[in-house]
Amino acid sequence: MSEYRIPRSYGFAVGQTLRAETGEAYRITGTLGRGGQGEVYRVAGPDGEYAMKWYRKTYLDCIDVEAFRQNLRQNVANGVPKLSNGDAATQFIWPLKMMEARDGSFGYLMCLFPSGYAPMSDVIMLRSRDGDTGRVVPLRWSSWFACVTAALNIVRAFEILHASGLSYQDINEGSISVNMQNGGVLICDYDNVSPDKTNLGIRGVVTHMAPEVLLRKKLPDRHTDQYSLAVILFQLFLRGHPMHGVESRAIINDEEYSQDAAMLRIFGIAPHYCLASQGNRNPPSRQVNADVLRMCMVFPLCLMDAFETVFTDGVSDPSKRLTATEWRRVLLQTRDSLLVVDGRENFYNTRRPMPLPRECRKLVRPGGHEVLLMPGKVLYRCHLDEYSADYSTPMTKVIPTAKPGVIGLLNATGSPLRFRFEGKTGACPNGKPIPLFPGMVLELKNTKLTIK
């Protein structure tokens, strides 16, 4: 078991032992970081190694400590948010045990972060800094598929959280870490997660707050979470902020505005979306916001239209903001607009339209959701079951056939795949391929899918 030297500025030293409220002793073996609320230590106990967050007394002195601690205890008791069908928000590094109070403060245990995850702030910038050498290290997504999957994992976590009657109240990139190889996501800093409409004093980060929270017209809740979530997604995909443009830069540089006044105007009083299609007062700067200008041409219109809705009408009308469930559907459509052609990934249905390959087919799900099909494309449970939110479990795969211009589907669903074509009906057994022709209707259980 490794031990690490702890700087004197930390409250505890290696070797000190603290107890959980359930009685187990945990020995400090090193540090993992610090922030405005407190410090995070590596600890070891009878059941393994964990991370322990310990609050600074100076922070606790500024809040209702008992309400804050009771809310944390309730989160520990309830466990990670879970739906009635068993789907759990496993993206959250949830509190596991409360630690006994000491010297007017307390903390809690959580799981250690696994390796392979980068802070979202680094992911947005596509670079990190080596802690030992100080050298800047470039970061890269393994694929666009992994990038969109990361976004799906983010919104699914908040979809389950909100469905459980909770709100996060402080969504920002500092709480999220991403695996850029497979799209895995981990979310921490859930200290203020509480029942919706209940607030423990946190308002959030200025750049991610809903305008009504920044203007102190409302306390954070599920609807303000929806605004903050959209900001996070915009940053992930477009590598900028939705309200950063020529106008906002002029305000920041205007000596008549203090820094606080400038932030209040840009994000609260008069937020202007940098990619607004009509009456744009705050277009991106070609020098400063080059990434946003470039990336907005990459992604499908379904995604860009969703951002425009939230950051124009949704600025003042919370009912125009997308729920996490609606974002999941938009992101699935985004991922389903992705094809690999000649070994290269491309999104289709973008602001810069490209013709679809000749052999491409479309699978149309109930509700009109279209999935572009090419050999190698994997279909997941949610594609074949209109009531499923499972975008991770593979069910079948698109394959080539011996006939030019015709692609097939390998049935790996575990059940016969019924089909209807040109007045004839039949069933493709599990493990067998079926060619796909325009006008064919596939049926699995109660879900009908049309091939175009």
Image (spheres, rainbow, N blue to C red):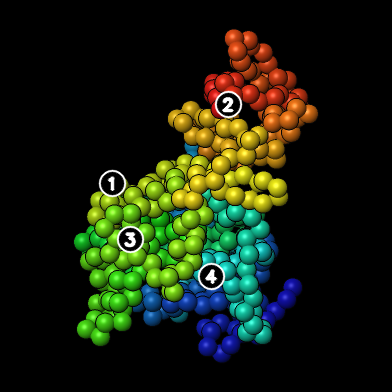
- The residue closer to the viewer here, 394 or 170, is 394
Calculate the distance from the C-alpha at mark 2 to the C-alpha at mark 1: 34 Å
Query: At 38% from the left edge and 74% from the top edge, which residue is drawn?
Result: 60
Calculate the distance from the C-alpha at mark 4 to the C-alpha at mark 3: 20 Å
Q: Is the residue marked by circle 2 packed among few (<14), some (14-19), or many (20+) residues within 10 Å?
A: many
Is residue 81 something one can see in this rendering?
no
Q: Earlier in the sequence, mark 2 or mark 4?
A: 4
Is disc 3 in contact with disc 2, using a CB cutoff of under 8 Å? no
Residue, disc 2: 451
Judged from the image, the secondary structure of the residue bearing numbered disc 4 is helix
Q: Position of residue 101 (x, y in %)?
A: 47, 72
Residue, disc 3: 273
- Among all residues in the image, which is located at the extreme top? 423
Residue, disc 1: 319
Q: Amino acid at mark 3?
A: Tyr
Q: Earlier in the sequence, mark 4 or mark 3?
A: 4
Q: Is the residue marked by circle 1 packed among few (<14), some (14-19), or many (20+) residues within 10 Å?
A: few
Calculate the distance from the C-alpha at mark 3 to the C-alpha at mark 2: 38 Å
Q: Earlier in the sequence, mark 1 or mark 3?
A: 3
Q: Amino acid at mark 1?
A: Ser
Judged from the image, the secondary structure of the residue bearing numbered disc 3 is loop
Q: Is residue 162 left or right of residue 217?
A: right
Residue, disc 4: 125
Query: At 44% from the left edge and 45% from the top edge, which residue is drawn?
Result: 302
Q: Amino acid at mark 2?
A: Ile
Q: Is residue 448 above or below residue 11?
A: above
